[in-house]
Amino acid sequence: MLDKLKKIWQVLRKPSVHFSLGFLTLGGFVAGVIFWGGFNTALEATNQEAFCISCHEMENNVYEELKTTIHFTNRSGVRATCPDCHVPHNWTDKIARKMQASKEVWGKIFGTINTRDKFEAKRRELAEHEWARLKANDSLECRNCHNFDYMDFTRQSTRASNMHSTSLASGEKTCIDCHKGIAHHLPDMKGVEGF
């Protein structure tokens, strides 16, 4: 057995055209699996609420606001976490969102919103970025939990039923058009139509 292993090792060490390519292919495959596993592990680790609120900017501002909403505590016990609303579930969309989030990391490093006053000063800008993102993707993150096809209009208020059955069905509006401030306090909306 030891002789066979020595022969295999000698063949793999030789600069032979056929075996070197095979070795590189196998080595590349193994390295790719290890890289992919590590990448996905890191991706999922950064897609947890504990990671999101690990910086005091999020924990002391928006997370405190979330705790007072129906998305945090409700009669059915289903709870939305930060990634549920701010990170798409589809892999390609998730990667694109993570690349956008690198700007948020930059802001963390340079203290863009590291105090309550700085956060409040940028609240509207941050909210408008998020609203525009949700508008552009047809409120994809909302629709991961709230499926329009399964809404029971008879159990909704008259106003909600009318809006859902007309605006959403026609494609004129998306969730975020009417549900701004559903999980976080609204910024100062002076000068914005409809507020």
Image (spheres, grey):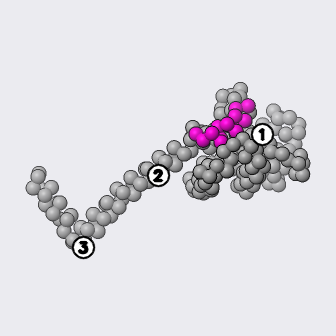
| Residue 152 location (% of width, % of height) | 78, 37
Which callout, 2 or 3, points to the residue nearer the camera? 2
Asked if the magenta segment contains residue 174, the reply would be no
Residue sitting nearer the eye, 164 or 52: 52
Residue type indicated by callout 2: Phe
Residue sitting nearer the eye, 194 or 144: 194
Q: Badge 1: how crowded within 10 Å, few (<14), some, or many (20+)?
A: some
Residue 15 in view, yes or no = yes
Residue type indicated by callout 3: Val
Which callout, 1 or 3, points to the residue nearer the camera? 1
Residue located beneath label 1 in the image: 185
Residue sitting nearer the eye, 47 or 161: 47
Q: How far apart are the two marked residues, 2 and 1, measured between alpha carbons?
A: 34 Å
Residue 149 in view, yes or no = no
Residue at screen point 84% across, 50% down:
167
| Residue 130 location (% of width, % of height) | 72, 51
- The circle on residue 39 is 2
| Residue 183 location (% of width, % of height) | 74, 39
| Residue 44 location (% of width, % of height) | 52, 45
SS type, badge 3: helix
Q: Is residue 73 left or right of residue 160?
A: left
- Helix, strand or loop: magenta stretch: helix
Residue located beneath label 3 in the image: 17
Q: How far apart are the two marked residues, 1 and 3, measured between alpha carbons?
A: 65 Å
Q: Badge 3: how crowded within 10 Å, few (<14), some, or many (20+)?
A: few
Tell me if residue 106 comes above or below residue 14 in the rendering.
Answer: above
